[in-house]
Image (cartoon, rainbow, N blue to C red):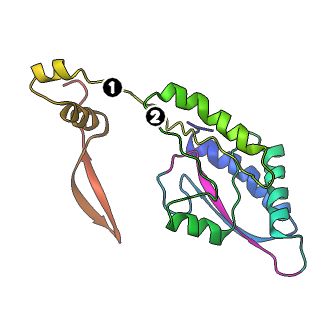
Amino acid sequence: PAGTSLDETNRLLLEVEAILEKNPYVASYSRRTGAQLGGGITEANTGDFFIRLKDGPRPPIDDVMQRIREAVHARVPVLDVETAQLMEDLIGDLTAVPQPIEIKLFGDDSDQLMQLAPRVANAISSIDGVVSVLDGIVVAGDALEVQVDRRKAALEGVDPQQVTEQLNAYFSGVVTSHIQEGVRVIGIRVWVPRHL
């Protein structure tokens, strides 16, 4: 669930691991928590499993995926579970369309979009063959929505973009330099003390 800590996400995904270990068709798996296959930006409450099935006689892959989905939903109902075959997932990443069906809603009224997204998800859920439907609403932790009054900002000699940049620097700091640690380059972030 959105806002779940990394420790709690790990606890929930250990439950999923137990399901995978009991599945007779799973040969091996790997898991990433707080990250996902494809390198997208993720929150601590997300992750993915890469599952390799055993060779030999077994039910069709779609049946195995369905059984895993159902077992996870029964044991850990708070999780949103998507299943995909590796090739279709990689093709989705390469074409910037992460799922075989993606419906995007656009508009300026975020409240209306929040109401419409679940309705659209419910509507397509009833279509045969459509599985792992998500409404696309991602709560990315705490958020602050700022509406800049252009006239008042102009009186202070700034425009909305400058106000946004100043707020970002205040809340998130500014990357002022980088250091190399092994093969990774890490940004050095500087914050102004909040009491100033």
Tell me which label, 1 or 2, sits earlier in the chain. Answer: 2
Q: Residues within 10 Å of mark 2 (few under 14, many from 20)?
A: few
The residue under the point 24% across, 59% down is: 178
Work out which residue is located at the far bottom of the displayed protein and give it.
56
Q: Quadrant of residue 33?
A: bottom right
Task: Out of 154 and 39, give the one closest to the viewer.
Answer: 154
Instruction: Where is residue 192? Give x, y as percent.
Output: 21, 34
Instruction: Give, as a single range, the part of the protein colored magenta.
Output: 42-56
Residue at x 51% of width, y 25% of height: 111
Question: Quarter of the image containing the C terminus?
Answer: top left
* Circle 1 residue: 146
Residue at the location (26% across, 32% down)?
167
- Tag 2 residue: 107
Q: Residue 194: x and y, percent?
A: 25, 27
Q: Please tell me which residue is depicted at 77% across the width and 40% down the height of the picture.
A: 77
Q: Within the image, what quadrant is residue 6 found in? A: top right
Residue 44, given in percent of the width and then of the height, sits at: 53, 46
